[in-house]
Amino acid sequence: MRFSRSASASDDFEINVIPLIDVMLTLLMFFVMTATFEKRALMQVKLPEASAEVMPVEQNVLTLIIDAEGRTYLGSNEILNADVAAIKNALIAVAGEDRDRPVSLRADGRTPHQAVITAMDALGQLGFSRLSIATVPSQPAGKSTGKPAGKP
């Protein structure tokens, strides 16, 4: 008895990788879109100086950060289009109805004044009354900051 192999081309083992590529690209897009980047943790804010004494840090404080370019962050989350309405929505999402919660405003010393006023306006419209503006202690007149006189 003789068996013929007329369909030898169709007997080749073949792996279809197109569905595998589709799944891998979907997973890659999922991980890229959901990944948290810690760039904000590296954000350097140069606080303005003041001669007031250091106050103790309270627990459960909302931290509103404004960097030198005027970008606004609530905690570590950036508030896009940081107008009064966007800041109010972000504050409501985080604080809920707790208007007695203390708020710390940490604005860079080089921040545009309008960005700070916008944040304070949003806080005032929502009824937050416990606002503190973060500063660093000023240098006494005798100490040098390492910068030439007259230079900011």
Image (cartoon, rainbow, N blue to C red):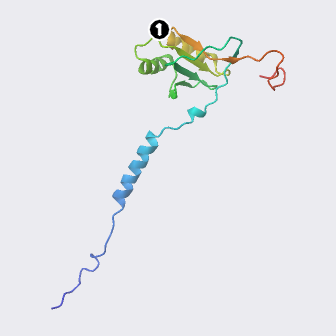
Relative to residue 127, is residue 143 drawn left or right? Answer: right
Q: Quadrant of residue 55?
A: top right
Q: In the rendering, at what x and y percent does residue 45 appear?
A: 64, 26
Relative to residue 68, is residue 92 drawn left or right? Answer: left
The total number of labels drawn is 1
Q: What residue is at 73 percent from the left and 16 percent from the top?
A: 138
Q: Residue furthest bottom?
A: 1
Q: Looking at this view, is 110 or 55 the one in front?
A: 55
Q: Look at mark 1 in the image and give the residue it sits on.
A: 127
Q: In the rendering, at what x and y percent does residue 92 appear?
A: 43, 18
Above/below status of 37 relative to 74: below
Q: What residue is at 53 percent from the left and 11 percent from the top?
A: 121
Q: Residue furthest left?
A: 1
Q: Quadrant of the C terminus?
A: top right
Q: Quadrant of the N terminus?
A: bottom left
Relative to residue 11, is residue 115 drawn left or right? Answer: right
Q: In the rendering, at what x and y percent does residue 59 appear?
A: 51, 18
Badge 1: how crowded within 10 Å, few (<14), some, or many (20+)?
few
Above/below status of 125 relative to 21: above
What kind of element bears circle 1? loop
Q: What residue is at 79 percent from the left and 23 percent from the top?
A: 145
Say which amino acid is labelled 1: Gly
Q: What residue is at 56 percent from the left and 32 percent from the top?
A: 40
Q: In the rendering, at what x and y percent does residue 140 appear?
A: 79, 15
Above/below status of 48 relative to 124: below
Q: Looking at this view, is 152 or 41 the one in front?
A: 41
Q: Residue furthest front?
A: 56
